[in-house]
Amino acid sequence: MLYFERGSPTDTLSIDDMRAGLNAALAKIGVRKRVLVIPPDFTRFHSQAGMLTRLAYDALGANLTDILPALGTHSPMTSEQIHEMFPGVPESLFRVHNWRTGITTVGTVPAEFVKEVSEGAVDFPWPAQVANLLATGKHDLVLSIGQVVPHEVIGMANYNKNIFVGTGGQEGINKSHFVGAAYGMERMMGRSNTPVRKILNYAGEKFTSHLPIVYVHTVVSRGEDGKLHVRGLFIGDDHEVFNKAAKLSLEVNFQMLDVQLDKVVVYLDPSEFKSTWLGNKAVYRTRMAMADKGELIILAPGLKEFGEDHEIDRLIRKYGYFGTPKTLASTKANEELRNNLSAAAHLIHGSSEGRFGITYCPGHLTQAEIEGVGFKYADLKTMTTRYNPETLKDGWNTLPDGEKIYFISNPALGLWAYRGRFEN
């Protein structure tokens, strides 16, 4: 059911607009006494989910009993991050999701279905896992809040991904990532009906339809003024609401280019990107636009680790980003990778498969660490002096010496593709 919708490529929703939309939806839903809110974590700071959570708290008061950030495999939010992202919301309401032990398996998607939708790429059963708090918390309303945007694992982020991955368990998260990698990331990004989405939809229809989940979807893009604008707000409890948001996201977040890019410079905001697990969005989101033998330069002042999780960080350091054939061979030969398929999938996602160069300019990691996982290294200060993110504009830039580059100030907000590669 659709409770509220507003959005267009030229719309700019204010806080008052979002408050009015959320309150209108809550009025249609009716009075609820025990409400769980599931927003993204700090890595999705620009989604406006923090503000919407605050607006939900204002509207629901004491009836909002729990807030469970959809961490997935990410590190728990710090107190500082909570106060910055969710201003005015009591920290006492926040719970921490444990993806290894704090989950309930609510059902299993059959291997035959997984094999069918992945076109034979994988043939294992998929466990539908959710946080214990969601499965047994006896809430009479669950507000799942987040941004719909092109995504490397599932095609378009959010909707039931926020539930089954954001609050999911180790096996479910690992296998969902591996399905996407095995099927082919470039076959999925920017598409709303992908193998991983079909698996999650199956799980939602069969195993969690009894839960009172309402999805609050935002669509956010950067305007010509360089500022972020909320282009849409869609609230409802079914797949159609997600489809409406995904359609608008494709219009405002997908940059279709008529030429391939020889040199791309991507800036990673240090408050948002501290690991390659997240920072490799610079790779994921640009790879369909990169020219063969092109160069991708990633300015990463906050980069201090590879994985958000200690074990995944160790695996990345050990196996590195060396392409699909080597990663699949390592997975076959090593039980520790087979037991961490999301890490294996991430290693595939983060490689250019030798097609273009990837140069990281980290704020904290050493040259040996960067080169040890298969990337090229460059000094951050030197490269920032040449490619100053404070003076470059998003899109094409010509430097004083005539060098032409394409600059991206936040890879999380879009997807870039060469028209010919995407259409083929």
Image (cartoon, grey):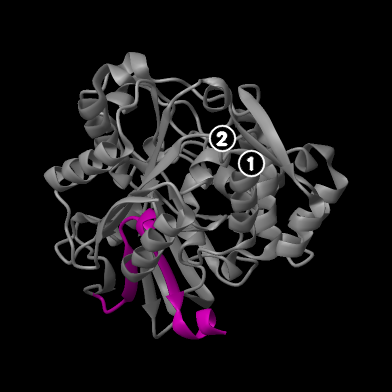
Along the line of sight, which residue is nearer the eye, 421 or 193?
193
Q: Is residue 184 above or below residue 343?
A: below
Look at mark 2 in the image and give the residue it sits on: 73
Look at mark 1 in the image and give the residue it sits on: 173
Residue 130 image offset from top left, x and y in percent: 59, 32
**Residue at x-position 46% and y-position 65%:** 296
Along the line of sight, which residue is nearer the eye, 236 or 105?
236
Answer with left or right where residue 211 lies relative to residue 310.
left
Secondary structure of the residue carrying numbered label 2 = loop
Answer with mark 2 or mark 1, whichever residue precedes in sequence: 2
Q: Is residue 48 above or below residue 246?
A: above
Answer with left or right where residue 225 lies relative to residue 147.
left
Along the line of sight, which residue is nearer the eye, 139 or 99?
139
**Residue at x-position 44% and y-position 59%:** 240
**Residue at x-position 43% and y-position 56%:** 242
**Residue at x-position 62% and y-position 57%:** 198
